[in-house]
Amino acid sequence: MMDYQPLYTEAQRSAQALLEWTRGVASPWAERVQGWALDWAARTAQILVAPPAAQRGRLQAACEAAAALRALLALAPAPQAQDAAAHDRRVETWLAQAHAYLAAAEPVPQTTPAVSAGAAQDALKAALQQPGTRLQPNSAWCFVCGLRNPVGLKMRFLQAGPGKAVAYAVVPEAYQGYPGVVHGGIVAALLDEVTGRAGTGTDPEHARLFYTARLSIRYRRHVPIQRLLRLEGALVRDRGRFYEAQGAIYDAATDQVLAQADALLAEVAAEELAQMNPAALGWRIYPLEECES
């Protein structure tokens, strides 16, 4: 379920600030600003009391009110123009966050994920039957794991034990470099993700997230397109804020190693993590069935 409380709180604060600012301005323009500010606040409040199926529609209505409010602020008389611009930036920031919520609340597109189709999807399902194996969260727009990114890889990752991540992929032609060969940059992206995933966990609200500080890759053989691959990432040493991991891409049929990586990852700082809203990022566990065509 989406948590709309941050959007509600900011809309109430911003609307209240607008009301206080325009209270001493005697003009039809100020009265209209006050009316739309109240309307925006009221529509945002309705999101919290609406049933889940209606929340996205209520948020769209609140966005319409915010857009109307911005249009009015752009028409501010000269004496109020500078202050109006400051309030407009606040409403603009709210709208950007709201649009991220709208995107994250959309159903996952009913098209087969780019690299988790067919044989890869079957392999994921089979791996999930192993004791202790669970799905990890996905996001909405990440190039590797974003399930709504139309040009992304839409990868799914499994936690296969403490400090171990596994994934399966069949890379389509769109991501090749030389004919029949996965582009080296895509190989790097896959290894970058699976090494980071070794320490992520399966709880969307308490996942450890990382930046890659260093990634060293050994391209041992051509990674073929349109062939089932197995990716593995393993935590080597946890140093607190930093951890070291290894990753590899295998031919799933032969267990032949195709590429390997050593990674040093830096954990996202707690204060920065606190500013990331999982709901707006679309960061949650998506059952495999949601992503099937």
Image: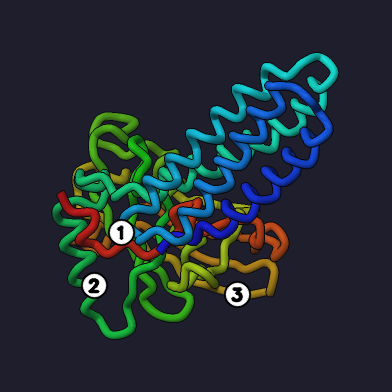
Q: Earlier in the sequence, mark 1 or mark 2?
A: 2
Q: Residue 183 or 129: which is nearer the viewer?
A: 129
- Furthest-bottom residue in view? 131
Q: Earlier in the sequence, mark 2 or mark 3?
A: 2
Mark 3: secondary structure: strand
Picture quadrant of residue 123? bottom left
Gap between marks 1 and 2, in whole Å?
15 Å
Residue at mark 3: 237
Q: Nearer the viewer, mark 1 or mark 2?
A: 2
| Residue at image coords 85%, 18% | 79
The mark tally for this picture is 3
Is residue 156 toward the left or the right of residue 90 in the image? left
Label 1 crowd (10 A; few <14 / some 14-19 / many >=20): some
Mark 1: secondary structure: strand
User: In the displayed structure, would residue 289 be above or below residue 96?
Assistant: below
| Residue at image coords 50%, 65% | 246
Picture quadrant of residue 32? top right
Give the number of the disc on residue 127: 2
Residue at mark 1: 250
Gap between marks 2 and 3, in whole Å?
25 Å
